[in-house]
Amino acid sequence: MESFQITAAGPHSSPLEGTVYVGGAKNSALKLMAAALLAPGITTIHNVPEILDVTVMAELLRRLGCTVAVDHPGDVDPTTELTSGVVRIGVPEELGWEAPYELVRRLRASIAVLGPLVARCHRASVALPGGDAIGSRGLDMHMAGLRDLGAEVRVEHGQVVAEVRDGLKGASLWLDFPSVGATENLLMASVLAAGTTVIDNVAREPEIVDLCEMLTEMGARISGTGSSTLTVEGVDRLNPVEHVCVSDRIVAGTWAFAPAIAGGSLTVNGGVAAHLDLVLDKLIDAGAEVNTHEGGFTVSADKRLRSFDVVTLPFPGFPTDLQPFAMALASVSDGTAMITENVFESRFMFAQELARLGADLHTDGHHAVVRGVPLLSGAPVVAHDIRAGAALVLAGLAGMGVTTVAESHHIDRGYPHFAEVLAGIGADVVRIGDSPA
Ligand code: UD1
């Protein structure tokens, strides 16, 4: 298995310098690909990131009867240009409705085909994705919402099976928690339901707004986009469209943390500062300099930053996906930080790995106290998920000596050419070992 090897002499010893390019959001592109199922014909999605998860979603759509062409420019240098590409999905009139475990287990986001399949085929059987390294991730809200829309939903032989005899019917739904995945599935189910659906307490992430915008372009009638309540007037049929995927705020946020942790100055081209208001404000309060400009922003840190507390919450709160980076930064900042994880219960598995690099931290339930130390020390660690993996690489840049991050394939699921881009901005990061087949 492949690992990333990072060699460093501590924070600010070899500052990061240069420009990075942020493409489309993984967490949007995968859902937009699922949304294509709602309209027979050819849907084209631009600004799709060059990551493994897109390949897996393409495979799943093919299994459902679609043709999928994933086209990323092969000869682009990721250190000087954007590598995002185009995905063209040909959706047949008659779709398959079974999403098998062997694909779903590789990509939890494949649960996003559930809503579109029930809407289009009036039945769906999608494997339960199972837990992963950041928590159990229930589907109760997805299932309860589909039931409210008139579907019969059960779990059978490890599959979520949903059926509705005469098509979905609009209803009033309420989510217990603004779940991203449940909002997306119920939205995609309701656009073809008969009558009006009102979904209250929905997630408001920019990726949800992107999905609402694409569905609206397809002919869906949605009001309340970007608010906590979505109202959907069902239509009989949607049309395929061309759509540009929203920028990846988590990748942009990762790059914002990179100079804060390692030192230096990075221009994040394509990063949308407005999607990272809270995060960038925290970095400024901690002593970093942030300048926004047309097409992106620049983050600079020429000294050790001050610690700050973090509480993760649904958007516009502090994103749970950036919590590991906040923890990595706190581990080398001046002072003590309290980090509270409210979204995924097991995200603190990362803390154990960070402790291997010499971080002084203590976790208790969903709280972590991190006392900053001036310097981490390189060690072998393991990436348990995408964000933890990338955060360990950045923490390695604040370490003395060599850090190896094993199971780096997780990082490649969310960050196009992460090691190569880091090397391009002055970090000593190389891939070692065999890449996974
Ligand atoms: C998505 C993102 C993930 C991000 C998360 C929160 C994708 C592919 N992934 O995940 O990167 O960290 O949003 O911003 O887009 N829950 C239930 N029952 C449900 C649904 C959710 O208990 O029916 C719980 C989950 O276990 C979790 C929390 O709610 O603890 C948040 O989940 P959710 O917002 O749905 O996240 P995902 O869509 O899985």
Image: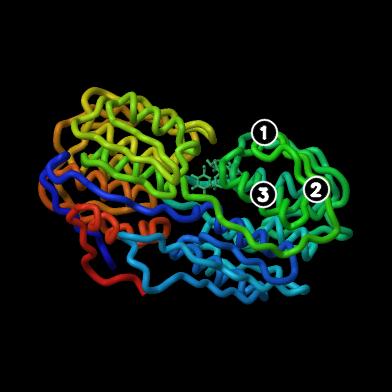
Q: Residue furthest front?
A: 294
Q: Earlier in the sequence, mark 3 or mark 2?
A: 2
Residue occupying the point 67% across, 54% down: 214
Q: Secondary structure at mark 1?
A: loop
Residue occupying the point 42% across, 52% down: 22
* Amino acid type of the residue tagged 2 in the rendering: Leu
Viewer-closest of 286 and 359: 286
Q: Foreground mark, 3 or 2?
A: 3
- Give the residue at mark 2: 149
Whole-Å distance between the Cαs marked 3 and 2?
A: 22 Å
Q: Is residue 91 above or below residue 210?
A: below
* Amino acid type of the residue tagged 1 in the rendering: Ser
- Give the residue at mark 3: 213
Colour scheme: rainbow
Q: Secondary structure at mark 2?
A: loop
Q: Is residue 8 left or right of residue 84?
A: left
Q: Is residue 317 left or right of residue 187?
A: left
Q: Foreground mark, 1 or 2?
A: 1
Q: Quadrant of residue 266?
A: top left
**Residue 342: x, y in percent?**
48, 32
Q: Earlier in the sequence, mark 1 or mark 3?
A: 3
Q: Kindly identify which numbered label has been placed on residue 228.
A: 1
User: Quick check: marks 1 and 2 in contact, CB under 8 Å?
Assistant: no
**Residue 120: x, y in percent?**
77, 63
